Amino acid sequence: MNLRAYISVLCGMAAVGLLGGCVNFAELPPGSVKAVVSPVVERREDVIPLPEPEPPPSQDYVIGINDSVTVSTIGGDATGGSRVDGNGNIQLPILGLVKADGCTTSQLSRNIGELLKLKKLYAEPWVVVQVVTYQSQPLYLINEGGGSSTTYMDRPLTLLEGVAKVGISAGSGNIKRAQLLRDKRLVPVDIHALVAKGDIRQNIWLKAGDTIFIPDKRTMQIIAFGAANGTFPTNNDGTLPLDRLMAQLNPNFVHSDLTRVRIIRSLSTTSGELIVVDFEKSMRGEALPFMLQDGDLVYIPRSKFTTWNDAFTEVTPALGAISTVLQPYVTLKYLFKN
C-alpha cells in the first residue's frame, strides 16, 4: 500500500470512530506484538437451485404467426406460398384460408390433404409443406448499453445453441453476470459457467421469446442498507475497503452492532455468500481491513439484536428501485424468490 492510500485508510477509520463514538481504543505498550486476523466471523455460501430438468422437446418445428411456408401438391392446384397471418392462417389457391398456426409441417400437410379430399379434388392427395422463413419464435439479445438484436429459432434450441446463435462468446460483455429472462423473470441459470466452464447442467431448453441480457464490462456499485443507506462506486479494481465506505455513510452508529455488519455477495448468477464482519475489531487494529467487492450489499444492523431475517426483511422491499444495478444472484434470491 502506498503512502497516499495508507493515509486515506487511516483518515476513513478515524472518521468512522468519531461518528460512532462506540469503539474503544487502547494503546499497547511499546514493543508489543499483536496478531492481526480476518474480521470475518461468519461466512456461508448460498446456492439457488437450477430449474428442474425438462424432457427434450419434439424436434418437429411448430409453425407460428409470421412464418412463411410453401405448399406443393400433385397437379399444382393447391400449390402456393403464404405468410401465416395474424389469425394463424395461410392463403392457398382453391382452398382459401387454411389454419397453419400450431401445426408441424407434417400435420399441416395432412390437414391440407384432407381438405382436398373433402372437395373431391384428389382421391389420395400428395402434399408437401416447407417452412421458408422462420419468424415466429424470436430469441432476443440485449446489452446494457442499449444495443439489441433478434434472431429466430428454426428448431428447439438449448441455451448453449442459443448463445452461439445470437453470437455470444466468453469475451462478450460481462458474461459473468449474463442473464436469461423469460416472461419478465430471471431464469436461475449460469450462462458464464456454461460457456466458459462447460457446465452442462446449465444447458436448459430455450423457449420462444427468451431474452439473453449481457451487462457491460464496467465497475458496479456497492449498496448500503440498514442504519445508513447509500450507493457507492468502487475503485478501478472493483473493490472498496469497508472502513472507507463507513466513513462516507455518516450514520448514527450509537445503537448499531458494528460487530455484526452483514454483507450479501454474489459469486455467480446463481450463487452467493452471506458474510458477517466484525468491523469494530478492524477499527481496534485487531483484524485486517475487510475489502468489499462490486455488487456487494452491506447491511448495517440497527441494533445489537438484528438477525439475518431482519436484514432480509428490510433489504428486499428496497431492492426493486435499484434492480438494474444488482447482480443476478441478488435479484433471483430476493426479488424473484416467490
Image (tube, rainbow, N blue to C red):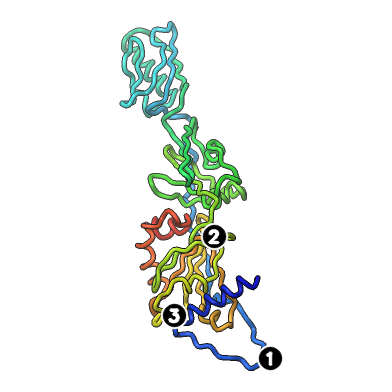
| Residue type at the position of mark 2 | Leu
Q: Quadrant of residue 335?
A: bottom left
Decide: is 86 above or below 221: above
* Residue shown at 31% from the left, 26% from the top: 87
Which sits in the foreground, 263 or 60?
Answer: 263
Q: Residue furthest top?
A: 75
Left or right, 4 with reference to 249: right
Residue type of the residue flagged with mark 3: Leu
| Residue 285 location (% of width, % of height) | 58, 82
Please tell me which residue is depicted at 46% across the width and 27% down the height of the picture.
134
Q: CA distance from mark 2 to mark 3?
A: 32 Å
Q: Which mark is residue 5?
A: none
- Which sits in the foreground, 153 or 248? 248
Helix, strand or loop at label 2? It is loop
Say left or right for 253 vs 14: left
14 on left or right of 323: right
Q: Are marks 2 and 1 in contact (CB under 8 Å)?
A: no
Reading the chain from its start, which is encountered first: label 1 or label 3?
Answer: 3
Can you tell which mark lies on residue 267? 2
Q: Is residue 87 above or below residue 12?
A: above
Residue 25 picture location, percent across and down: 53, 88
